[in-house]
Image (cartoon, grey):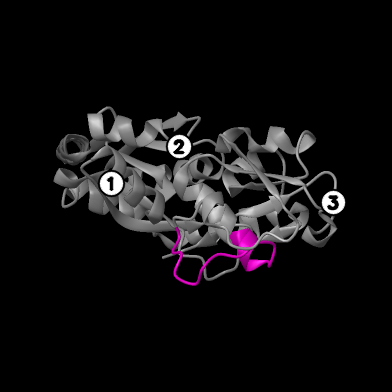
Amino acid sequence: MKKLIIAATLAVLAAGSALAEDIKVGVSAGEHAKIMEKVAEVAKTKGLNIDIVEFSDYVVPNQALNDGDINANSFQHQPYLDNQIADRKFDLVSIGKTITTPMGVYSKKVKSLDELKEGSTVAIPNDPTNGGRALLVLAAKGLIKFKDDAGIKVTPADIIENTKKIEFAEIDAAQLPRSLDDVDAAVINTNYAMEAGLNPKKDAIAIEGERSPYANVIVVRTADKDAAWAKTLVEAYHDDSIRKFIEEEYKGALIASW
């Protein structure tokens, strides 16, 4: 009888191993990587093994996914993805929301936007989507103005009112924290801010509103959107334990968006 039980157990384990699937998921360094490590733990219990691949910028992960070097990525919001698809003709699609990372304004020289002097320099991301997002944060705080129908893909050229004659330095998003010694303020994505030891809740002199349309997403190639592993990946990310981890680890600096 004992031999039969052992044989049956080994058969079950072998079947589980055969059903297990391995995927590579690209993430940006910081909170996206840290959360995906927890997601991988949940996914493993569902038969999905996740190999996490970290990238240091926002450009390579979509190219790597489109080229088939990874199976999915989790680092970007929907407007950025839409822009990448339009500009680079990627055949990618989002399959689930993850977190919202409110963009913040940081400074080593002033404690509020009101303290910025005429002609001050503010650094923003140099990619079109996040650059536009940064400008909209500043507009929402009254520093600059756009036309009412300007949309979300705004650039410094679209500004119609700039009473303090703010100059904008467009810098690679990952380098913005390092720019704080050289500019009067910088509008920084949360993952890069936190990676540099900045806390949006404590250190930002202004922060994006809660009604931001910039929820981050899990992205796959269009051909894989209905794959079983893709569904499992989303289910693992949307597990209650992941929401709890985000709430306890980031204390409101990040928001679960599902």
Q: Where is residue 66 in the image (x, y as percent from the top left)?
A: 25, 34
Range of magenta residues: 137-152
User: Could you tell me if residue 150 is visible in this image?
Assistant: yes
Tell me which numbered mark, 1 or 3, is placed earlier along the sequence: 1
Viewer-side residue, 187 vs 245: 187
The magenta stretch spans residue 150 = yes
- Residue 244 part of the magenta-drawn span: no
Q: In this view, does 231 lie to the left or right of 107?
A: left
In the displayed structure image, the side of residue 162 where residue 49 appears, left or right = left
- Whole-percent x, y for residue 179 in the image: 71, 34
Main SS category, magenta section? loop
At 78% from the left and 44% from the top, the residue drawn is 184
Quadrant of image for the N terminus: top left
Amino acid bearing label 1? Ala
What is the secondary structure assignment of the residue under circle 3? loop
Mark 1 to mark 2 CA distance (whole Å): 16 Å
Name the front one of labels 3 and 2.
3
Q: How many numbered dots are placed on residues in this image?
A: 3
The answer to which image quadrant residue 97 occupies is bottom left
Between marks 1 and 2 in the image, the one whose residue lies nearer the viewer = 1
- In the image, what residue type sits under mark 3? Val
Tell me the quadrant of the picture where the C terminus can be found. bottom left
Q: How far apart are marks 3 and 2 (CA)?
A: 29 Å
* The one of 198 and 250 positioned closer to us in this rendering: 198
User: Can residue 252 be seen at all in this image of the molecule?
Assistant: no
The residue pinned by badge 2 equals 58
**Residue density around tag 2, few if under 14, some if 14–19, many if 20 or more, within 10 Å:** some
Tell which of 47 and 170 is nearer to you. Answer: 170
Please give the residue where the numbered disc 3 appears in the rendered image.
Answer: 110
Q: Which amino acid does label 2 sit on?
A: Tyr
Tell me which label, 1 or 2, sits earlier in the chain.
Answer: 2
